Image (spheres, grey):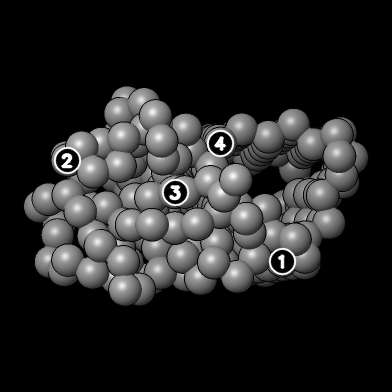
Amino acid sequence: MVTKIVIYGAGPFAELMHYHFSHDSDFEVVAFCLDQAYLSQDQLCDLPVVPFEQVEQHYPPEHYQMFVAIGYSVMRNRPILYNKAKAKGYHLVNFISKKAVVRDNLIIGENNVIQSSCDIDPFVKIGNNNVFWTGSIIGHHAVIGDHNYISGGGGVGGNCIVGNLCFLGNAALMVNDIIIADETYMISGTIILKNTQPASKYHGNPAKMIGEHADTGIII
C-alpha cells in the first residue's frame, strides 16, 4: 500500500522534494501545507496547498504522514518547523534515494534526505531532519545529530561526531576522529583537521575559524 504524504513547505526545496518523492520513492505526495502568514498560492505541482494551521483537518495524521521541506537559508528555522509538525502528531518520513549506497545497519531518525550518489558507510547513526546532498560521503561509525545540512560532495570522516544545526558547504570535508560542534558552518571547500568550536564559521585548507554566530542570530 502506498504511503501518502503532505509536504510542509511551498518553496523551491519543497518543489524539488516533490519531484524526488514522485520519481525516486514509494511515497505519494497528495498536498503541500504552509503557515497561513506565508500562504500566497492554493496550488503547487497541481496539488492543493493548505494552511498548516488546518492541515490535520484535511489530512489527519492517522492516515497521512508528512515531510518538512526546509532548506539552509536560516538554519535555526529547521528545528522550529520540524517540531511544529511533530506537535501535530505526524510521523515524518525519510527520503532515501534508490540510487544512494546505504548499508543495512544504518540507524536513522525521521525527516532525513539522502540524495542519489550518497555513500553511507556501515555502523553510522543519523538523527532527525538532516540533508545529505548528492555525492556526500559519511564514514564508518560516524554519528550525525539533528537538523544538519551537508551539501553536494561533502564528507564526514570515520568515527566523526557531528552535532546539531551544522552546515557543510559543497565539497567541505573533515579527517577521521573529529568532533564538529553544534552550529559549525563550513564554507565550501573547507577541510577540517581538528575539532571545531560551537557556533563558529570555518574556511580554508587547512580550515581556520573566521567568525562566530551571535546567540540570537542566524547561521547564514
- Residue carrying label 2: 54
Which amino acid, by three-letter code, is at mark 4? Glu
Q: How many marks?
A: 4
Q: Are marks 1 and 4 in contact (CB under 8 Å)?
A: no
Q: Quadrant of residue 98?
A: bottom right
Give the amino acid at mark 2: Gln
Quadrant occupied by the C terminus: bottom left
Q: Residue at x 16, y 68 (%)?
A: 41
| Mark 3 or mark 4, earlier in chain | 3
Sequence-first disc among 1 and 2: 2
Residue wearing tag 3: 5
Residue at image position (72%, 66%) is 116
Q: Nearer the viewer, residue 28 or 79?
A: 28
List x then y, in percent, for residue 181. 59, 35
Quarter assignment of residue 215 = top left
> Does the rendering let one see residue 11?
yes
Query: What is the C-alpha distance between the residues marked 1 and 2?
Result: 34 Å
**Quarter of the image that includes the N terminus:** top right
How far apart marks 1 and 4 lie (CA) works out to 18 Å
Residue with the mark numbered 1: 116
Q: Nearer the viewer, mark 3 or mark 1?
A: 3
Separation of marks 3 and 2 at Cα, in angstroms:
15 Å
Would residue 37 appear left or right of 210 to someone viewing this image?
left
Residue 18 is situated, as x and y percent measured from the top left of the image, at 46, 65
Q: Is residue 172 visible?
A: no
Q: Is residue 213 left or right of residue 172?
A: left
Q: Which element is circle 4 on?
A: loop
Please state if 96 lies on the left or on the right of 147 as rendered.
right
Residue at 44% over, 58% down: 29
* Secondary structure of residue under mark 1: loop
The CA span between labels 4 and 2 is 22 Å
